Image (cartoon, grey):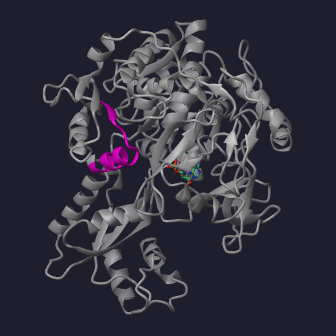
Amino acid sequence: MTSDNQELTAQSAAYPPPERLVNPEEGREKPWISSMAEYEALYNESIQQPDKFWTRTANELLTWDKPFTHVTQGSLNEGNMAWFSDGQLNISYNCVDRWAIKDPNRVAFVYEADEPGQASKVTYGELLAKVCGLANVLHSFGLRKGDTVAIYMPMIPEAAVAMLACARLGLVHTVVFAGFSAASLAERVADARCRVVITADEGLRGSRPIRTKAIVDEALKTCPEVERVLVFRRTGSEQVEFNAPRDVWWHEAVAAQRPYCPPVPVSAEDPLFLLYTSGSTGKPKGVVHTSGGYLLGAAMTLKYVFDIHDGDVFCCTADIGWITGHSYVVYGPLALGSTSVVFESVPTYPDASRYWKLVEDHRITQFYTAPTAIRALRRHGDDFVTKCDLSSLRVIGSVGEPINPDAWTWYNEVVGGSRCAVVDTYWQTETGSHVITPLPGATVAKPGSATFPFFGVELAILDPTTGTELEGNDVSGVLAIKRSWPSMARTIAGDHKRFLETYLRPYPGYYFAGDGASRDADGYYWIRGRVDDVINVSGHRLSTAEVESALIGHNAVAESAVVAAPDELTGQSICAFVTLKNGFEANNKLKEELVKEVRTRIGPIATPKVLILVDELPKTRSGKIIRRILRKVVAGEADQLGDLSTLSDPSILDVLVREVSTAI
Ligand code: WT7
């Protein structure tokens, strides 16, 4: 990789922490970390005296049923990492009971329903009763510690209740994003061996119903091992099919249960959840997160990165179907006893002011969203933002993909009114919580850089070919982490070998993140995007192989190659090249059918933006598709194709370039 760091450093403006954080008004506390020196002292302690550092923080932030006596064991070399392993705790007790006992009227969730003006609140006292009631229902189904439950629900507080009810019994949940198709849901339910699925009759997004239960019914046609489907009534639609005794109404089942359920203590290393994510091969992997380390990571990053204090109202717009929703809608905020906003709608319903109206209505203090939403809302113009009162905001965050400096600056100036700290947080499903991020009261931000490592995270930049660590500043390579941290994933469900091969074997002794990165002359980290076959569309991760196999599933398709194309709005978009079997005619109707095939097999998020029917794909003499060429062509860099000596038929290049230029 070439190094353009110097240029970047020189170009980029630097933004010190805003005055109102550094010198808070009367009655407001100072930031938890209020200078670089403080950050450095704590960071150094976390690296040099990890036992001391983690013993203190794990006891400060979590309540243990049985205290741990040792902090960490295992190594990245062996892939057997464990944290606080002889300690026991219950995650739902930590997230709910602690606060319900102390202050039952404190608000746990502000629920902003799809239709504006219908917000409601769930207090910690109410949450405890809901979680206990549902946990008793799950227990009555015969579920016991270690069993896995699938959750396929809209963004409503009950989705969090379902997660916490599982955690109360030591059950493992696997939330499947409710935008995934029946086929994707079925694949995950089967892989995780779930016997119970929790869902809702329907969801609502921008006033459009989503037929959640119908999708579950479709999926379960191929999952005979599922015995129970628990259905929350969200819309009360008459059209929902109900197949008793398999299907059970949530409200009826809970009404039959006692509203208290004792929490089951689990080992810190017992799994809390699986979350499926795309890798570089076709089959999604069930990333396994355990209990103690994960909860500590979620709580601690939220506390320091968003500088959460008592009375704050935190809003993360991610869906609970993604890791961001797990860590920063549910587990992080509740572990801190904070108030979390559950947002059911879309940012443009009824108009592009929805987020900002949300901030105004609920006096939100910290707001967390994705660059794709920022870019989309920016296009609607500043008025939608500036007409709302955003004076409650102190920290605004970004996650999911690199944020372009322009979007960063708009977010800072127009949304944050130049009075807020902007935190560009880099992390992954596998890291469980933030690993590279600014701290709002301490870090001088550079737009587009995630800045510095969080506590306990020891970063390295490696030469991609030799694996040698590149020391010093002003270097570029692949991003790696040198030691385990509490919230890192421990394995892939049912496939530890794949876990080792994906993350720990590529560069022995390191966790390999799959991203390219540089460290600039000032030591700031800049994430350059994935170096594997993963596409990031609007902050959602998809594998090229997954989309290719969906296309091949269509009868007309001979071969396909899928690459990422740069996209102004969604960061990247999916561009599919397809060759047809003999006897099939290339026409627009077939193209539409192929796009539809991908939507049905995976879900709307995987929709190819461009699909090009070609006579031939660029291949090596041994028949391997050269995706690199396709990537360059769709990026408009056909003049920089590099070494073409392996290409078996160079004459197809001109045709490709022509086809692409008419299609894009
Ligand atoms: C990939 C992880 C974890 C939250 C949501 C996505 C990219 C994430 C940033 C950022 C640059 C980022 C990386 C990473 N990414 N945040 N702040 N700057 N890139 O989770 O689906 O597991 O995807 O998202 O490429 O590897 P995910």
Residue 617: image quadrant is bottom left
* The C terminus - image quarter: bottom left
Q: Which residue is located at x 13 percent, y 30 percent?
A: 239
Taking the image as shown, residue 295 lies to the left or right of residue 273, namely: right
Residue 568: image quadrant is bottom left
- Confirm whether residue 252 shows in the render: yes
Count of marks, rendered view: 0
- Confirm whether residue 364 shows in the render: no
The image shows residue 366 at horizontal and vertical percentages of 58, 28
Q: Which residue is located at x 54 percent, y 17 percent?
A: 96
Taking the image as shown, residue 56 lies to the left or right of residue 230, namely: right
Q: Which residue is located at x 41 percent, y 9 percent?
A: 259
Q: State whether residue 650 is above or below residue 564.
A: below
The image shows residue 163 at horizontal and vertical percentages of 45, 29
Given residues 273 and 369, the one toward you in this image is: 273
Query: Bounds of the magenta span?
Result: 183-199
* The N terminus - image quarter: bottom right
Given residues 564 and 295, the one toward you in this image is: 295
Given residues 499 and 474, the one toward you in this image is: 499
Question: Is residue 264 magenta-colored?
Answer: no
Q: State whether residue 549 is above or below residue 285.
A: below
Q: State whether residue 607 is above or below residue 81.
A: below
